[in-house]
Amino acid sequence: MDEATFPHIDHTALSEKVYLILRTKILKHELKFGEKLLIDEIASQLGVSRTPVKDAVNRLALEGLVEKVPRRGTFVTALTARDVVELLDLRLLLELYAAEKVLEQGRVELLLPEMRRCMANIDKAANSEHPDYDAYMSWNRDLHLALIRLAGNNRLLQMYKSLNIHLQVARVHYAHSVEDVSQTQQEHKAIYEAFQNGDWEQVKEAITTHINNVRTTVLRTLEAHGIR
């Protein structure tokens, strides 16, 4: 074996793969609210050691998708109605800040085509013969991320992405079909037209109305499932 060489195993890449698998299962409701994560069992099923699983779980804990309870274990985080309200309040603040920056910095012409592309794909995902809820959610998210990204603040973008992970969890768990796309798209169009007009007050009103309606929808579905 003097001539033999062995490739270095990228532990970081392995942890990343485990993280993405667990995160996807949480977002898709394959791991339910309050469910305990069994590290040994997960490692066995994935064919890896405990270490990358523990690393992945630690990362999920930092994002708030799982919570560690001393002497009990690690559980998928359960969102309450209050959590959703607080998250959407923060989302509103961040989107209004980003909108103001986009207007101030003259980036509206960069935003508008991104919004048009996302709205077209939302319609495609929702109105096809077999509506694609995952694609609908992805394009809906991308529309709002375009606004945040064009504010030009990387910390703002990371904070917003973290918030949206939690909101995805709430909506995926409690809304398993495409929502009233017509209403959602009307609200997106109102935001688009407000930016097109370059009217800050109109932009503020359109974004606030949209997020308040999201809040109402999510809280209604939570209440229907007995979550308060």
Image (cartoon, rainbow, N blue to C red):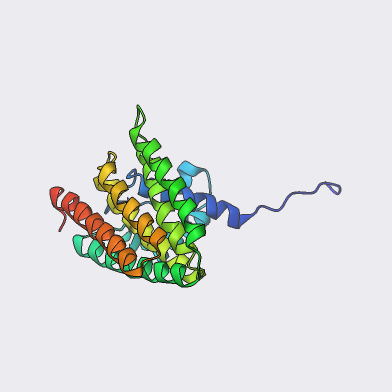
Q: Is residue 57 visible?
A: no
- Residue at 15% across, 59% down: 228
Q: Vertically, is 199 above or below 140?
A: below
Q: Nearer the viewer, residue 196 or 80?
A: 196
Residue 147, image x, y percentages? 44, 61
Q: Vertically, is 164 above or below 176?
A: below
Q: Nearer the viewer, residue 95 or 190?
A: 190
Which quadrant of the view contains residue 94? bottom left
Residue 197, image x, y percentages? 39, 61
Specify whether 51 is left or right of 77.
right
Residue 143, image x, y percentages? 42, 53
- Residue at 66% across, 52% down: 9
- Residue at 27% across, 57% down: 210
Specify whether 223 is left or right of 54.
left
Q: Nearer the viewer, residue 185 or 137?
A: 185
Residue 167, image x, y percentages? 32, 56
**Residue extending furthest toward the top:** 129
Q: Is residue 17 visible?
A: yes
